[in-house]
């Protein structure tokens, strides 16, 4: 999912110092999560985007002017690093709503969650998934959603409140913050070219969206067949 900017020209000008940033965070210790290094520096933010990180660990820009901002926040030497991403969560399992969960995890640094409303889908069907999508709107964090792939998880072996075919999945893929298909746990159906699973995977593939895997202990030819069917995590 790509976040679209309102005005790239303004961002460019803010980065160059031709217009003041909305916020400048000063006196930080910036954590480079790729190298493990920590730099002292300042961060300029404009229209919700980081436009410039001002630090010079290699001494290449000794004459660069300090960032100018409308507002300043003094970090007083605290560490600054990117928000944490929870790559897979079932919010229903916490017994909380999306908003209340956001209130609980944001103070600990989680700013993005990839959620799989599998449980509520198995109870309430499409209405449950749409509810989770609507309840996670306008939060001070990003909650992205995967469409449950197996409702029920194993047809014929459990009582479920709904039954998703490719039609339901295809419809839910059109929701704004849906980025793909949630854990494809019916790996037996996948590797045996079950019609339900094949049609669901094809519906997601047609939209060129992410397919999340779930195949514990699957090895050898079975695992190869599963990967060939489309799951890519």
Image (cartoon, rainbow, N blue to C red):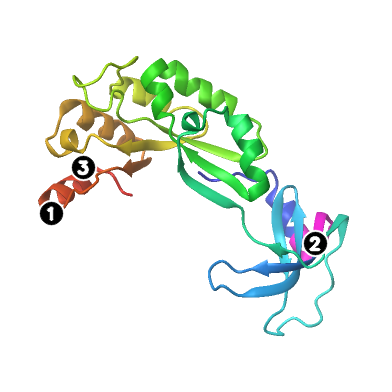
Residue that badge 3 annotates: 229
Residue that badge 1 annotates: 220
Residue shown at the point (68%, 43%) measured from the top left: 6
Q: Does the magenta stretch include residue 22?
A: yes
Residue shown at the point (53%, 49%) measured from the top left: 85
N-terminal-most mark, 1 or 3: 1
Q: For the residues marked 3 and 2, what is the alpha-carbon distance in whole angstroms? A: 49 Å
Residue 82, percent from left and from top: 62, 57
N-terminal-most mark, 3 or 2: 2
Q: Residue furthest bottom?
A: 59
Residue 221, percent from left and from top: 11, 51
Residue shown at the point (21%, 38%) measured from the top left: 187
What element does badge 2 sit on? Answer: loop
Judged left or right of residue 40, residue 129 is left
Give the residues drawn in magenta, as a range: 13-25
Please state which of residues 43 and 113 is positioned toward the viewer in this rendering.
113
Q: For the residues marked 1 and 3, what is the alpha-carbon distance in whole angstroms? A: 15 Å
On residue 75, the disc is 2
Judged left or right of residue 99, residue 55 is right
Residue 84, percent from left and from top: 57, 52
């Amino acid at each position: 999912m790509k976040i679209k900017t309102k005005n790239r020209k303004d961002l460019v000008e803010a980065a160059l110092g031709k217009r003041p940033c909305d916020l400048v965070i000063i006196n930080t210790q910036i954590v480079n999560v790729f190298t493990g290094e920590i730099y002292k520096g300042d961060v300029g933010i404009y229209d919700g985007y980081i436009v410039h990180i001002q630090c010079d660990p290699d001494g290449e820009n000794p004459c660069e002017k300090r960032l100018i901002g409308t507002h300043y926040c003094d970090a007083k030497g605290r560490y600054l690093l990117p928000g944490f991403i929870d790559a897979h969560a079932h919010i229903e399992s916490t017994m909380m709503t999306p908003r209340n969960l956001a209130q609980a995890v944001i103070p600990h640094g989680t700013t993005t969650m990839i959620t799989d409303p599998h449980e509520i889908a198995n109870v309430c069907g499409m209405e449950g998934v749409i509810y989770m999508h609507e309840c996670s709107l306008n939060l001070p964090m990003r909650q992205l959603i995967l469409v449950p792939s197996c409702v029920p998880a194993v047809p014929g072996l459990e009582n479920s409140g709904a039954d998703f075919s490719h039609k339901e999945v295809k419809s839910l893929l059109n929701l704004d913050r849906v980025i793909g298909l949630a854990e494809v746990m019916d790996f037996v159906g996948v590797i045996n070219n079950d019609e339900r699973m094949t049609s669901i995977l094809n519906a997601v593939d047609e939209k060129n969206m992410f397919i999340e895997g779930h195949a514990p202990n699957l090895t050898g030819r079975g695992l190869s067949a599963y990967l060939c069917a489309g799951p890519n995590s």
